[in-house]
Amino acid sequence: MSVTPPQRVWWKEKVPREERLWFSIALAWAIVMFIMMPLWHIYGSQNPSTETYKVEPEEYVTLTQQFIERYKVGEENGVPVVEPPPGSDVYLLGKQFSWEPVIKLKKGETYRLHLSSADVLHGFSVYPMNINFMVIPGYDYVLTITPTEAGEYRVVCNEYCGPGHQLMVGKIIVE
Amino acid sequence: MGDDFRTCPVTGFKVHLPAEKLIKVNAVTAVVALLVGAIMALLVVLTRWETVHLLRPIDFYKFVTLHGWNMLGFWIIFFEVAVLYFAGAIMLNTRLASPKLGWVAYALMLIGALGTNITVLMNPTKNAIMFTSYVPLKATPGYYLSVILFAVGALLAVFNFLATLYIAKKEKTYRGSLPLVVFGALAAAIIAVSTLLFGAAALVPTLFWSMDIAPTWDALTYRIVFWAFGHPSQQINVAAMVAIWYLLAYLTVGGTTISEKFSRLAFVFYILFINIASAHHLLVDPGVSTAWKIWNTSYAMYLAVLASMMHAFAVPAAIEVAQRKKGFNRGLFEWLWKAPWKNPSFSALILSIIVFGFLGGISGVIQGTEQLNIRFHNTLAIPGHFHGTVAGGTTLAFMGITYYVLPLIFRRELVGKSLAVYQPWLFGIGIALVSIGMQGAGLYGVPRRHADITSFGGSGFAFEYDPTAYLWLAVMGIGGILAFAGAVLFVLIAVATLIKGRRL
Ligand code: HEM
Ligand SMILES: [Cu+2]
Ligand SMILES: [Cu+2]
């Protein structure tokens, strides 16, 4: 009975066949998943990046400003637009409550996209691809990216960052 | 002894009256929290349903924060404390170790719960930081203090339960091993102790930091410590829920597990494996190594899922065997069709198993793989997952057992029996639609915790999501209204029973 002590010593009891069979199936599934996890990582092409550096928020802000000064080509909604050369280091700064700068990239070229924050946590979510990464102050998260489709992408903040969180949209343009 | 006890005429349990009183207080408080949480849920869901878009951003953030706390924190944990006292004192025919400590624990939890609500309502700009309370977003000290008081109270309640088990063992009020339901409650309690200690490690330094007497701490370290507490804390709910499943299978159809060993081992697996499986919250974080992510989300997680699969077999088996013994042997499923569907506790049990397993469990395994997480992290699909597990599964199980707590502990005949038959369906179908709608919208990248995906507060970069996403949000919205109605109906039946129910 579930509500009274077991009649026999439970750990000496023999588990019936049906239960053993179900357990074997479930365990086999767990083992398959266990093996698949590293395999997916090794053979798959959708792995989260592991390239991270420590960086003081102020330092990252300076890096982004230097990056903007170097490659600025215009402005949109008061946010600088930059066009860095292919292969270069691209800096995206999350801060309450905007993404800076707007980035123009070339289709088929590879870039090193740096993500970090000037203040609190932010979430880097690219629409319409639906790709999501955490942006954490103190950490420079580097994604090596090669845009394969031209278009205008939005960067939505999807980690609550304060009362103006909903304002935080940015843009990446691929030409 | 003697005066402090009564014998339950239905179950034959010896009921310790001071324990019974504490069970009542904690259960009533839980139901009040459920009502408050449900009202906030309605406001929040009607905001996320973009066609309605009810609240201003600041009010939305305020009510999401408090909906999370009142539901996941206060409804669930006050109820679990009641379950622990019941499993410890009543089911073992013994006394609660210390009723006094029980009241201290209750007072701390109540002050904490009120404090959390008050600090967030009074100062949402600073304190509506969501229950995760990630640093370096800084709330006022009162907020962190409230949360810590609540957690300390909960920890004391767990110790009280453990001490009660010790007394029962010493005074030999039961023979042999603990009954299965108490064993499950013990698993929940063990996980709770380790979890609450991690909770202290996350929140106590944060409190001092908010008072400017401790340095700020690394935002990623906080996340790691917080989830070391945050994920296992959900396993408390799972273990408690499964213990209630076994109890309900017994109370509704007289079913019991075919194999005590099988079911108990599954509880042991929860204790052993889930405590470390927290990396699935950090899969797209910088600075967390791939090896740790893979090890943690495969080894530890799948062995805990294995335990849930075992219970998912054992509980329906218990029901089937009991039903077949009664002679419902025609065809494969007569035992199921002829089950006591008129008993709201039975339908709540079945819905709990289905919603938890199929909507919550499967989505959790999918979202928790390293590669796929990139597409789910912080989208609405995440709340979609846990509105299947804890908001659907655990809540339904607790609602189901309440229909027994009212006659057996409060000794009142249920008021509105005919409505109660539909209540689990109303809530269950509603919350299932909430879960499905959120998961659908999440696939299109709709973020969670976002006040305005239509105009983005007027940002110049505003855009529109795929129209299909809005359709999913409507599914969530309609489900939300049904679930709200189901939750309110539950509260009404419970309150009416307490006030007007015939004394038994
Ligand atoms: C009464 C029916 C319910 C409805 C309509 C509902 C709806 C919602 C909605 C729309 C959100 C906000 C999602 C977002 O924008 O991120 C939410 C968040 C949440 N809900 Fe519910 N919910 C209900 C019941 C519950 C229950 C019973 C629980 C727990 C036992 C629960 C736990 C939570 C939690 C923990 C959050 C996350 C808050 C945060 O992101 O900080 N909900 N719910
Ligand atoms: Cu944000
Ligand atoms: Cu988790």
Image: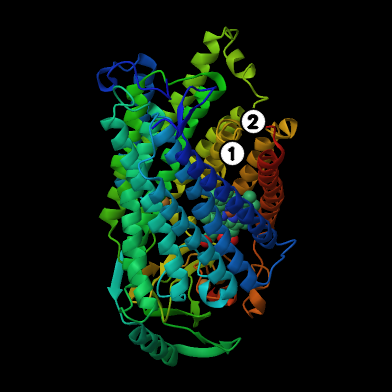
**Rendering coords of residue B58 (x, y %):** 62, 73
Find residue B88 and report its image quarter.
Answer: top left
Query: Is residue A149 placed above or below B303 in the rendered structure?
Result: below
Q: Are marks 2 and 1 in contact (CB under 8 Å)?
A: yes
Q: Position of residue B45 (x, y in %)?
A: 66, 57
Give the residue at mark 1.
B399
Of labels 2 and 1, earlier in sequence is 2
Indicate left or right for B102 with B456 as reference. Answer: left
Determine whether, in the image, residue B267 is placed left or right of residue B463.
Answer: left
So how many labels did they put on this image? 2
Amino acid at dot 2:
Pro
Can I make out residue B289 in this image? yes
> For this rendering, which residue is in front, A113 or A120?
A120
Residue B212 to residue B285: above or below: below
For the residue marked with disc 1, what is the amino acid? Answer: Met
Q: Write the residue at 61% across / 64% down.
A: B63
- Horizontal and vertical percent for residue B483? 67, 46
Spatial CA distance of label 2 from label 1 is 9 Å
* Residue corresponding to mark 2: B344
Q: Position of residue B106 (x, y in %)?
A: 46, 53
